[in-house]
Image (cartoon, rainbow, N blue to C red):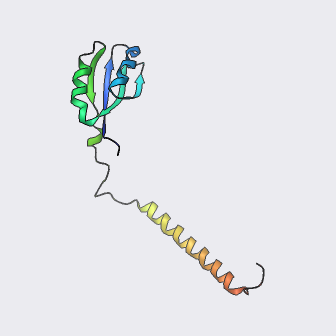
Amino acid sequence: MRERRLGLAVWVKNTRAAKNLRKFGTIHYVSKRLNYVSMYVDAAQIDETIRVLERLHFVTRIERSHRHEIPIEYNNAKPDKAKEYDYKQEKHQLMALADSLIGENELQPAGSPQ
């Protein structure tokens, strides 16, 4: 099973030093213009990793990602009426097509070519 990972944004003085962060987790993105590194760290060791990263001389600031706190399932989501109408129309068209194909097959004798 995959272990849970959490995101970190690590601001650095120089992006060349970002290579040194590979031993602490998986680097996802390095911004050369804003001088930050987006990376993922094991959830079980995130506090310890942050403490170690803060002591590095090229790290200026560290922020945790709050993405895991955002709900992704919504209970009161209202269905889109336009899509619902389209699905009903599509279903009726498919049913009509199936009925017409079944009707054509019933009219032809079993041994005759189509």
Image coordinates for residue 112, horizontal then vertical, percent: 77, 84
Query: Which residue occupies 72% across, 86% down?
Result: 110
Quadrant of the rendered structure where residue 111 is?
Answer: bottom right
Q: How many marks?
A: 0
Query: Which residue occupies 30% across, 54% down?
Result: 74
Quarter of the image with the C terminus is bottom right
Image coordinates for residue 55, horizontal then vertical, percent: 23, 16
Q: Residue 107, relative to residue 3: is it above or below?
A: below
Image coordinates for residue 62, horizontal then vertical, percent: 27, 24
Residue farthest toward the front in the current orientation of the protein = 1
Residue farthest toward the right in the current orientation of the protein = 113
Is 27 or 101 nearer to us in this picture? 27
Query: Which residue occupies 50% across, 64% down?
Result: 86
Q: Residue 39, relative to residue 35: is it above or below?
A: below
Is 77 or 111 nearer to us in this picture? 111
Image coordinates for residue 15, horizontal then vertical, percent: 39, 16
